[in-house]
Image (tube, rainbow, N blue to C red):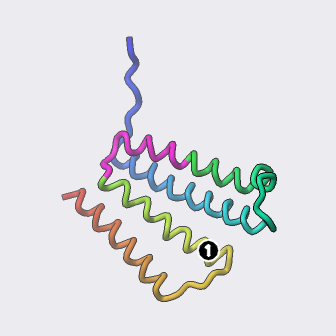
Amino acid sequence: MPRESFRFSHRQSVGLVFLCTLFGVAAQYFIKSSGMQMAQITLASLLTNWHLWAGLSLYGVSTGLLILALRDGELSLLYPVISLTYVWVTVLSVLVFHEKLTGPKVAGIATICCGVALLGKGRSQ
């Protein structure tokens, strides 16, 4: 007799996708760090760079969580939440890698946040 699989609520699906964005940011951090450590990109340097493998692994975890979230959630709501990764990456870039936060970047972040909020509001109606 088949067992009934666990299903996620709407709120849990949103939480999973939000978690995906955080794993995506961590993945970007490790991939950026891996590139900064390599003087030359060779097969040996790629195979032995643990920062690179950590980043790729975190992308794998993020993808697994996304699959679980999309199974039970609304694609039209959940997928735009992934765009918050751009927001977190920009914040990480400024705080950790000391990149400049420019007016256009702030405008882009505001646009992304407003878009995600509007799409979320559209779901509740």
Which residue occupies the extreme front position in the image? 42
> Which residue is located at x 61 percent, y 78 percent?
94
Which residue, given by chain and number where applicable, does mark 1 sit on?
A: 93
Mark 1, Cα crowd under 10 Å, few <14 / some 14-19 / many 20+, is some
Q: Is residue 33 above or below residue 1?
A: below
Is 30 situated left or right of 6 in this image? right
> Which residue is located at x 78 percent, y 57 percent?
42
Which residue occupies the extreme left position in the image? 125
> Which residue is located at x 64 percent, y 76 percent?
95
> Which residue is located at x 37 percent, y 76 percent?
111
> Which quadrant: the C terminus?
bottom left
Which residue occupies the extreme bottom position in the image? 103
Is 28 situated left or right of 53 in this image? left
Which SS type dominates the magenta stretch?
helix
> Which quadrant: the N terminus?
top left
Three-letter code for the amino acid on which mark 1 is drawn? Ser
| Magenta extent | 62-75
Q: Is residue 110 above or below residue 80?
A: below
Give percent across and percent down for residue 117.
Answer: 33, 67
**Front position in the image: 7 or 104:** 104
Q: Quadrant of residue 36?
A: bottom right
Give percent across and percent down for residue 101.
Answer: 56, 84
Q: Quadrant of residue 22?
A: bottom right
| Disc 1 secondary structure class | helix
Q: Is residue 19 above or below residue 91?
A: above
Give percent across and percent down for residue 31.
Answer: 67, 61
Give percent across and percent down for residue 28.
Answer: 61, 62
Q: Indicate whether residue 18 is drawn in magenta.
A: no
Q: How many labels sit on residues?
A: 1
Is 54 situated left or right of 15 in this image? right
